[in-house]
């Protein structure tokens, strides 16, 4: 395996609904044109919507590579999923910059440990950890009492109040007062953004040690890592090709995820989809679906019709809920034409 220089790497963390995917999409749109960037996305659910949404916003740029690790925290199972994904990115893509989007329910400290492990510390230059937080959630104990929420803020170098266009300065003041009372939280900067517009300059200001950055990665044979990367994807693509509806269910840390892959013969009604999203607005809903009005992305309650794209030949749908929801698949299928 060839040696590589340290890759500037940035963790964009935040609890469910904090706007991580929107921020990363914005950063990708404004990256230097000559640079090759990679994104490693982890999701609590098993469908992998965030990666598809990011790809859909940057599909015209061949200098962007997106890798997904769906199905729970990327650091679980001794870090095997993230190790495989990182090896693929570093060996095959050799990016100028790497963005990591952990699950909103991920264990951030364990992800940092992996990035600073003997396997990767000579190849990854870990910059500031950026944590997004919706200031309105400070009043909700489901967030403030959750260990992952508190850990994301405690490990943050920069805390960003996201969705600032949706609330007033009083909410940001409440966030600042709450942060001041949390002794374990000590960021270098607290700022706010609207519409996911995080300045790229925050990334370029990151500092990391570039000395001795030419050491070979841990030895993994080409066949071993390629088999791990391709096995699950091949099985999924075959199932979709067989016109199946693939359902997933996951639970952990007090949350439940439901997801579906639907073949291209399943067409959603945009009008029905809009009603569904509003009815379930209390939950985290994300989707990239084929509708009677074209390809549509769903992020929370925001629905956008996208330009026609050759690489979208299925529908992906996922929800994360506070409690189990009976007959949810029926409600999703009711949105079909």
Image (cartoon, grey):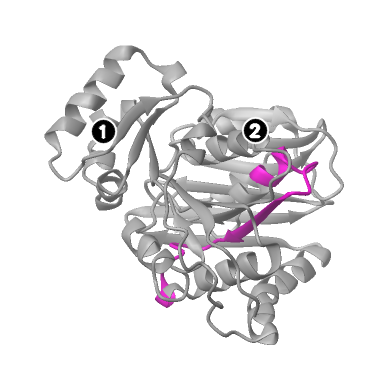
Q: CA distance from mark 1 to mark 2?
A: 34 Å
Residue 42 visible to the viewer: no
- Residue under numbered circle 2: 30
Tell me which residue sits at (55%, 71%) in the image: 214
Q: Which residues are magenta?
A: 53-78
Q: Crowding at label 2, few (<14), some or many (≥20) Cα neighbours within 10 Å?
A: few
Residue 140 numbered tag: 1
Residue 253 numbered tag: none
Q: From the viewer's perspective, is 309 left or right of 206?
A: right
Q: From the viewer's perspective, is 233 left or right of 177?
A: right
Q: From the viewer's perspective, is 199 left or right of 14?
A: right
User: Which x, y percent locates residue 158?
Assistant: 35, 38
Secondary structure of the residue carrying numbered label 2: loop
User: Which x, y percent locates residue 50?
Assistant: 59, 47
Tell me which residue sits at (77%, 33%) in the image: 306
Q: Nearer the viewer, residue 66 or 314?
A: 66
Tell me which residue sits at (50%, 30%) in the image: 198
Residue 159 visible to the viewer: yes
Q: Nearer the viewer, residue 311 or 39?
A: 39
* 64 part of magenta stretch: yes
Q: Nearer the viewer, residue 224 or 285?
A: 224
Tell me which residue sits at (32%, 47%) in the image: 152
Residue 223 to residue 162: above or below: below
Q: Say which quadrant the N terminus sits in.
A: bottom right
Task: Count the numbered circles shown.
Answer: 2
Secondary structure of the residue carrying numbered label 1: loop
């Amino acid at each position: 395996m060839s040696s590589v220089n340290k890759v500037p790497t940035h963790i964009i963390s935040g609890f469910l609904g904090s706007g991580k995917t929107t921020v990363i999409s914005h950063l990708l749109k404004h990256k230097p044109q000559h640079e090759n960037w990679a994104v490693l996305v982890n999701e609590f659910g098993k469908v992998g919507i965030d990666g598809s949404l990011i790809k859909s916003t940057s599909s015209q740029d061949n200098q962007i590579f997106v890798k997904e690790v769906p199905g729970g925290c990327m650091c679980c199972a001794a870090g095997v999923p993230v190790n495989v994904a990182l090896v693929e990115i570093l060996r095959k893509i050799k990016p100028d910059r790497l963005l990591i989007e952990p699950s909103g329910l991920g264990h951030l400290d364990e992800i940092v440990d992996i990035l600073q492990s003997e396997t990767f510390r000579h190849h990854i230059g870990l910059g500031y950890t950026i944590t997004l937080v919706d200031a309105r959630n400070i009043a909700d104990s489901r967030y403030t009492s959750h260990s992952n929420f508190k850990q994301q803020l405690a490990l943050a170098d920069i805390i960003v109040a996201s969705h600032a266009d949706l609330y007033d300065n009083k909410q940001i003041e409440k966030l600042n007062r709450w942060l001041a009372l949390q002794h374990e939280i000590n960021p270098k900067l607290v700022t706010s953004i609207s519409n996911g517009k995080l300045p790229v300059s925050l990334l370029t200001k990151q500092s990391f040690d570039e000395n001795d950055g030419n050491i070979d990665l841990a030895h993994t044979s080409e066949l071993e890592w390629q088999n791990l990367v391709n096995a699950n994807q091949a099985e999924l693509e075959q199932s979709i090709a067989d016109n199946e509806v693939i359902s997933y269910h996951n639970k952990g840390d007090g949350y439940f995820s439901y997801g579906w892959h639907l073949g291209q013969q399943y067409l959603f009604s945009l009008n029905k989809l809009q009603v569904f999203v509003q009815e379930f607005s209390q939950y985290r809903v994300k989707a990239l679906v084929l509708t009677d009005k074209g390809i549509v992305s769903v992020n929370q309650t925001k629905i956008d019709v996208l330009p026609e794209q050759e690489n979208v030949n299925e529908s992906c749908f996922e929800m994360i809920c506070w409690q189990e929801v009976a007959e949810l698949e029926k409600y999703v299928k009711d949105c079909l034409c």
